[in-house]
């Protein structure tokens, strides 16, 4: 445990960031799972909505440095390829 006041504050801040980031990552994982289910069910409308939501979520995560921007682009590309099968 930190003894210095600034170190205690840094610990609190890093813990808050950790919780915030993990919740956003969990939300994205769940979103990708529902996207995969809609692709497997061949539901074009739901797939399009989920793809739009995935793009939005990944762009925000990359903007806020939760994930790297190249990872966001890679995941968006892979999702688009999966959605392309239905068209």
Image (cartoon, rainbow, N blue to C red):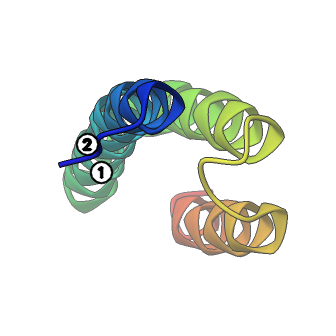
Q: Is residue 77 above or below residue 56?
A: below
Looking at the image, the residue that sits furthest to the front is 3
The image position of residue 77, as x and y in percent, is 73, 70
Residue 27 higher or lower than 40, as above or below: above
Tell me the element at label 1.
helix
The image's mark for residue 26 is: 2
Residue 16, quarter of the rendered image: top left
Residue lying at 57% horizontally and 63% vertically, measured from the top left: 79
Left or right: where does residue 52 sit relative to residue 26? right
User: Which residue is depicted at the point 41% across and 36% down?
Assistant: 4
Q: How many numbered discs, if any?
A: 2
Mark 2 touches mark 1? (CB < 8 Å) = yes
Q: Nearer the viewer, mark 2 or mark 1?
A: 2
User: What kind of element bears circle 2?
Assistant: helix
Q: Where on the picture, by quarter, is residue 54?
A: top right
Q: Is residue 66 above or below residue 60?
A: below
Q: Residue at x 68, y 39 (%)?
A: 55
- Percent of width and height locating residue 82: 52, 70
Q: Residue at x 35, y 51 (%)?
A: 32
Q: Is residue 37 left or right of residue 38?
A: left
Reading the image, the residue beneath label 1 is 29
Where does the image place residue 52, in percent across and percent down from the top left? 64, 30
Compared with 56, 40 (above or below) is below
Few, some or many residues within 10 Å of mark 2 (<14, 14–19, 20+): few
Q: Quadrant of the C terminus?
A: bottom right
| Residue in the foreground of this view, choosing between 65 and 87 | 65
Q: Which mark is residue 77?
A: none
CA–CA distance in space, label 2 to label 1: 5 Å
Pick the residue in front: 43 or 23. 23
Q: Position of residue 36 (x, y in %)?
A: 29, 58
Q: Residues within 10 Å of mark 1 (few under 14, many from 20)?
A: few
């Amino acid at each position: 445990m930190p003894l210095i006041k600034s170190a205690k504050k840094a610990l609190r801040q890093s813990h808050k960031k950790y919780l915030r980031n993990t919740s956003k990552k969990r939300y994205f994982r769940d979103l990708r799972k529902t996207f995969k289910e809609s692709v497997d069910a061949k539901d074009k409308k739901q797939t399009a909505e989920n793809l739009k939501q995935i793009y939005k979520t990944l762009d925000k995560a990359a903007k806020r440095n939760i994930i790297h921007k190249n990872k966001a682009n890679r995941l968006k590309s892979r999702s688009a390829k999966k959605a392309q099968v239905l068209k």
